[in-house]
Image: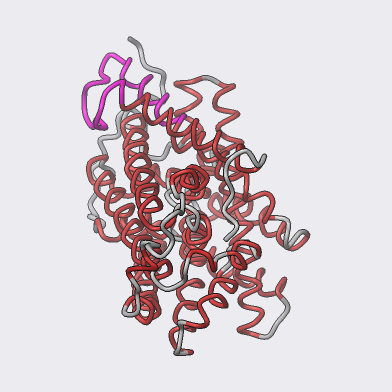
């Protein structure tokens, strides 16, 4: 079978050898953001055991689907992303729909992070939130404009800071975990399983790193190393999610989540609810610091993925001028939207989880199925599992999207505390 001109294998040998830890931290930083901060309220109905099952299942599926993208990309030059690969393999219509979903989710997340950071910096710096948002974008998007290596370096620092602030803040809660609260043994008639379905869309957004897969492949120049970095990143994220949920669910009784859920599950509402068990102001400040670092790391990680994706979409060159153009189309639209509609993302981000199922589950599975149909489909890197795994990943994505819309329509059981 003849291959299109873009189906070429890049044999470039990298002189530099980026660390797997750096790549894993980039992936983890993309995952650990606003999604994590929303997990406690999203999982309040399912509580500890079912929440752990939901996020573990999601982590496994999201890791495998990321590997499927790596396998589909192996026929292409290292600089390509979703746009070129999807267009070649699935056609213009599928590519156009996928483009819309990728940018919608990436843009909405950047929009949310920019707005949230502006509100946080307003309190810290004492300046207008809009000015804070502009400063935030100008300063921290510069790392993305500079290089993936710069993102690597700051991601490692942010992950270290997040771990330290998280450890200090959560340690104050972890040492006081009450097992009867953690497993809700005081409420023998409670029903948990039905609420796990509504949690899946939030769990999926907590592992939505797939727009960074091509960045990892280009960074390492090797699918096998990128595979390890992806697994490392999703494992780090899963571990942090476990610690976070155990610490929250082990201190704040399930029936006291009502006020948190009413206020959208934001960190301030959660800290207010935890006020009775947080005895130290330093612990509360550490959790706030962790939240800020999580938003910043996700902004940079998501920004890198969208940046590389749009560079491929618009065919901008990898020069200072070309990267400046890519920076403009990546960061200016969400910044402008944040300045004009600073609170509109609350509604829009609700649909981001459903939209993300397209490019985190469905498209990767369809791409790898098409890739394996090539004459040399069995050569080189190969994601685990055959047709059954492809069907399972697609099924997980479809069901997650269905659960999301069912929850928004009030069809799924809604936990109110």
- Residue 2 shown left or right of residue 334 in the figure: left
Q: Quadrant of the N terminus?
A: top left
- Residue 377 shown left or right of residue 65 in the figure: left
Q: Residue at x 24, y 48 (%)?
A: 228
Residue 364 position (above or below residue 350): above
Q: Position of residue 359 (x, y in %)?
A: 49, 36
Q: Is residue 326 visible?
A: yes
Q: How is the image coloured?
A: secondary structure
Q: Quadrant of the C terminus?
A: bottom right
User: Which residue occupies the foreground of this view, 205 or 277?
Assistant: 277
Residue 269 position (above or below residue 415): below
User: Which residue occupies the foreground of this view, 42 or 181?
Assistant: 181
User: Which residue occupies the foreground of this view, 363 or 198?
Assistant: 198
Q: Position of residue 416 (x, y in %)?
A: 60, 57
Q: Residue at x 68, y 59 (%)?
A: 335
Q: Toward which corner of the image does residue 354 lie, by quadrant?
A: top right
Q: Position of residue 218 (x, y in %)?
A: 35, 45
The magenta stretch spans which residues? 362-388
Q: Is residue 300 visible?
A: no
Residue sitting farthest toward the right = 340
Q: Position of residue 2 (x, y in %)?
A: 35, 11
Q: Residue at x 27, y 44 (%)?
A: 227
Residue 287 position (above or below residue 115): below
């Amino acid at each position: 079978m003849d291959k299109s001109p873009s189906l070429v294998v890049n044999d470039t040998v990298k002189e530099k050898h980026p660390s797997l830890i750096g790549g894993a931290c980039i992936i983890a930083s993309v995952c650990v953001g606003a999604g994590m901060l929303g997990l406690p309220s999203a999982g309040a109905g399912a509580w500890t055991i079912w929440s752990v099952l939901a996020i573990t299942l999601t982590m496994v599926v999201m890791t495998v689907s990321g590997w499927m993208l790596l396998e589909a990309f192996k026929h292409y030059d290292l600089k390509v992303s979703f746009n070129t690969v999807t267009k070649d393999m699935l056609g213009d219509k599928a590519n156009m729909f996928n483009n819309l979903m990728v940018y919608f989710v990436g843009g909405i997340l950047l929009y949310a992070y920019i707005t949230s950071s502006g509100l946080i910096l307003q309190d810290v710096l004492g300046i207008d939130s809009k000015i804070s948002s502009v400063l935030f974008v100008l300063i921290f998007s510069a790392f993305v404009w500079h290089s993936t290596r710069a993102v690597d370096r700051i991601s490692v620092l942010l992950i270290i800071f997040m771990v330290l602030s998280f450890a200090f803040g959560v340690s104050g809660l972890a040492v006081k975990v009450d097992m009867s609260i953690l497993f809700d043994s005081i409420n023998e008639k409670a029903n948990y399983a039905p609420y796990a379905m509504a949690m899946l869309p939030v769990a999926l957004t907590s592992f939505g790193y797939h727009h960074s897969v091509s960045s990892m492949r280009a960074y390492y120049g090797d699918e096998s190393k990128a595979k390890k970095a992806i697994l490392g990143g999703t494992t780090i994220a899963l571990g942090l999610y476990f610690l976070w949920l155990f610490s929250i669910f082990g201190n704040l009784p399930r029936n006291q989540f009502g006020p948190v859920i009413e206020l959208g599950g934001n960190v301030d509402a959660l800290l207010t609810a935890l006020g009775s068990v947080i005895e130290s102001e330093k612990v509360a400040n550490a959790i706030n610091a962790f939240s800020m670092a999580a938003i910043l790391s996700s902004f940079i990680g998501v920004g890198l993925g969208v940046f590389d994706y749009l560079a491929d979409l618009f065919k901008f060159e990898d020069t200072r001028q070309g990267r400046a153009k890519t920076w403009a189309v990546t960061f200016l639209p969400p910044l402008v939207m944040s300045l004009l509609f600073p609170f509109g993302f609350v509604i829009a981000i609700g649909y981001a989880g459903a939209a993300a199922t397209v490019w985190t589950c469905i498209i990767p599975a369809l791409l790898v199925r098409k890739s394996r149909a090539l004459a040399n489909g069995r050569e080189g890197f190969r994601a685990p599992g055959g047709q059954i795994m492809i069907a399972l990943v697609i099924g997980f994505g479809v069901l997650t999207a269905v659960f999301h819309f069912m929850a928004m329509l009030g069809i799924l059981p809604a936990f109110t505390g």
